[in-house]
Image (tube, rainbow, N blue to C red):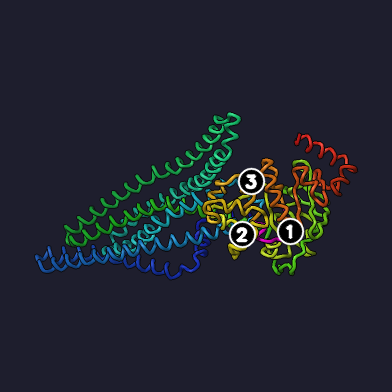
């Protein structure tokens, strides 16, 4: 992470300033919201002045016409206040919601650009909480808190000016009480700030543990670990409770203090005001207006304290979101990157590559591989040998610690991301499908493909009869993660998607390793069509995949220990022969 710490809640000024810089295109709506809210505040503040005139010039002077005029003006102000307040609430809510739309898009776009290493070390539940719990906190502030904060802040400033205008001597006495209130508020803010930062942190842990437990529920039940898993969740949930109670403790003492100071200010005002009314230095209307303003003075401060809870929660959420946005993109497009020249041959060279996820623990050392155009190479080895890491480096999910990987002679780091991804495709063990129709999944990597293009690919792969047998054919909904289909059917869709994208290089993480024999035959038939004439690197978990490869590379402890055809390695490599025997025992 580069500079996320600069935007902690402890530095709300920098946090707010950065948040403001993300409000692209909202200048005029923000200005409009401010103007309308200011007008609404001014209209409301005129009310006590009208009442003072009605009392002093109407009631005291026994002038009924003045009383009626004052009443009419006051009613008119109420009508105007209704409409401008409604406009203020709508405009502030619009700005807040529009800002959240932009923020969600920015954060999600950044997540999609982060390297695989980030997702490996970050729990998916934490990332989900960034886009759910944290965004919800911001949304709650945008829909409720922002309107209240702006209107009450303007009211406090306006009422302070009105109090000084009505009677500056009594205003000074009130401001003395307010000074005490401000000091108490500073203490409260410090406590609440820490508490809400902790709440945001711990809700992420709760969601991460919850998601882990639900995702792995079959394993939990298989090993009868329900009690252990529930106990783990209970401890984390208890810590979340403690964080919320820390915030509650701060609230529990602050608001009674505010209410007490409000009463003190009212008593001081009545004592001074009544004395001055009796000696004739103040009119009754002025005292009434001052008391109205005083009530309006403390109530917005109480409201702002309520809003402060929402604000702290929102600032904590912003800090967490900025942590994601400040993550360095380890694998990014270099300045001056260029496209691969057409036609792409698909020749790959891995030259002197070393790599480590953790600098202290090397995973690969001195890897040299040359894959010719159209060649099919199988990479084999025991679990943890480094074979899957080689495939990830070829796809540039990571950059090597040293050495270089080239495609048609071009360093992968010098190529534009779009050009590289157009030329290469990864097919994992489990075909992942997105919610939507089969058509949308087939054309995911080639949005401009027509139905004719799709059917042509399905026919070549020999799976068009299966798609035509479905009642809705290409319009069939696959449901979330493709749950409507079996593992083999999902893999067939994934292969067709890659075929339609027409890459020159296919990196295959053994697409048949988790399938039953009958389904495996169908998938292998589709694979033959997909790999024909294309360069392919297969991470082989089965003997059959190694036998079909033009060349086999065996990896052990991050180094290449054998290379040749399947038959050559069976005759010339003890390690490979032993691996083959293990495979054969597994087939027996």
For marks 3 and 2, give the one nearer the viewer. Answer: 2
The residue at the far right in this view is 572
Q: How many marks?
A: 3
Instruction: Please determine whether, in this image, residue 544 is positioned above or below residue 338.
Output: above
Whichever of callouts 2 and 1 sits on the residue coming sooner in the sequence is 2
Name the residue tied to disc 3: 488
Which label sits in the foreground, 2 or 1? Answer: 2
Looking at the image, which residue is at 55% across and 57% down? 107
Secondary structure of the residue carrying numbered label 2: helix
Res. 316 in view: no
Q: Locate the N terminus by quadrant.
A: bottom right
Q: Are marks 1 and 3 in contact (CB under 8 Å)?
A: no
SS under mark 3: helix
Q: Is residue 569 left or right of residue 394?
A: right
Quadrant for residue 368, please give it: bottom right
Task: Indicate the secondary structure of the residue bearing disc 1.
Answer: strand
Q: Magenta region: which residues?
A: 497-507
Residue pointed to by mark 1: 505
On screen, residue 444 versus residue 23, left or right, reads right
Tell me if mark 3 has few (under 14), some (14-19) or many (20+) residues whose alpha carbon lies within 10 angstroms of its own: many
**Is residue 240 at least partly visible in the picture?**
yes
Q: Is residue 503 magenta-colored?
A: yes
Residue identifier under label 2: 455
Query: In terms of depth relative to the viewer, which is nearer, 386 or 183?
Result: 386
Residue sitting at x 76%, y 61%? 346
Magenta span includes 31: no
Marks 2/1: CA distance? 22 Å
Reply above or below: 586 against 184.
above
> Residue 146 appears at what percent x and percent y?
40, 58
Where's residue 198, x and y in %?
Answer: 51, 45
Is 35 situated above or below 257?
below
């Amino acid at each position: 992470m580069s500079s996320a710490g600069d935007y902690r809640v402890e530095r709300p000024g920098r946090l707010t300033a950065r948040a403001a810089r993300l409000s692209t295109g909202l200048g005029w709506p923000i200005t409009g919201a401010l103007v309308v809210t200011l007008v609404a505040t001014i209209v409301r503040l005129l009310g006590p002045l009208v009442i003072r005139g009605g009392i002093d010039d109407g009631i005291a002077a026994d002038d009924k016409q003045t009383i009626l005029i004052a009443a009419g003006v006051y009613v008119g102000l109420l009508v105007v206040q209704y409409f401008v307040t409604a406009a203020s609430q709508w405009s502030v809510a619009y700005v807040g919601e529009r800002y959240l739309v932009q923020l969600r898009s920015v954060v999600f776009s950044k997540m999609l650009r982060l390297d695989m290493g980030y997702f490996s070390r970050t729990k998916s539940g934490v990332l989900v909480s960034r886009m759910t719990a944290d965004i919800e906190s911001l949304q709650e502030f945008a829909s409720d808190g922002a309107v209240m904060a702006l209107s009450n802040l303007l009211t406090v400033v306006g009422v302070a000016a009105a109090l000084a205008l009505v009677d500056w001597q009594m205003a000074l006495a009130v401001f003395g009480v307010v000074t005490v209130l401000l000091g108490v508020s500073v203490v409260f803010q410090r406590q609440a700030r820490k508490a809400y930062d902790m709440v945001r942190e711990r809700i992420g842990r709760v969601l991460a543990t919850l998601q882990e437990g639900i995702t792995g529920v079959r394993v939990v039940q298989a090993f009868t670990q329900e009690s252990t898993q529930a106990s783990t969740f209970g401890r984390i949930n208890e810590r979340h409770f403690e964080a919320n109670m820390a915030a509650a403790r701060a609230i529990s003492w602050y608001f009674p203090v505010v209410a007490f100071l409000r009463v003190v200010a009212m008593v001081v005002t009545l004592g001074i005001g009544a004395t001055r009314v009796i000696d004739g230095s103040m009119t009754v209307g002025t005292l009434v207006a001052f008391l109205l303003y005083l009530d309006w003075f403390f109530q917005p401060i109480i409201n702002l304290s309520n809003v402060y809870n929402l604000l702290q929660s929102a600032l904590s959420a912003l800090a967490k979101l900025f942590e994601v946005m400040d993550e360095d993109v380890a694998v990014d497009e270099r300045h001056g990157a260029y496209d691969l020249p057409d036609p792409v041959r698909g020749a790959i060279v891995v030259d002197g590559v070393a790599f480590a996820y953790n600098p202290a623990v090397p995973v690969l050392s001195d890897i040299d591989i040359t894959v010719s155009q159209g060649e099919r190479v199988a990479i084999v080895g025991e679990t943890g040998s480094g074979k899957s890491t080689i495939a990830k480096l070829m796809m540039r999910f990571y950059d090597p610690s040293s050495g270089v990987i080239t495609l048609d002679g071009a360093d992968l780091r010098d190529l534009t991301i779009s050009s590289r991804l157009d030329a290469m495709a990864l097919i994992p063990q489990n075909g992942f499908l997105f919610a939507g129709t089969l058509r949308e999944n087939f054309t995911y990597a080639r949005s401009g493909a027509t139905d004719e293009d799709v059917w042509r690919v399905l026919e070549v792969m020999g799976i068009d009869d299966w798609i035509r047998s479905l009642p809705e054919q290409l319009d069939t909904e696959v449901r979330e993660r493709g749950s409507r289909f079996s593992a083999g059917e999902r893999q067939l869709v994934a292969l067709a998607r890659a075929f339609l994208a027409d890459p020159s290089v296919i990196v295959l993480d053994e697409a048949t390793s988790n399938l039953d024999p009958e389904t495996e035959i169908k998938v292998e038939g589709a694979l033959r069509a997909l790999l024909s004439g294309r360069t392919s690197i297969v991470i082989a978990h089965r003997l059959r995949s190694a036998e079909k490869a033009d060349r086999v590379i065996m990896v052990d402890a991050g180094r290449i220990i054998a290379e040749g055809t399947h038959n050559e390695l069976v005759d010339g490599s003890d390690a490979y022969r032993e691996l083959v025997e293990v495979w054969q025992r597994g087939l027996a």
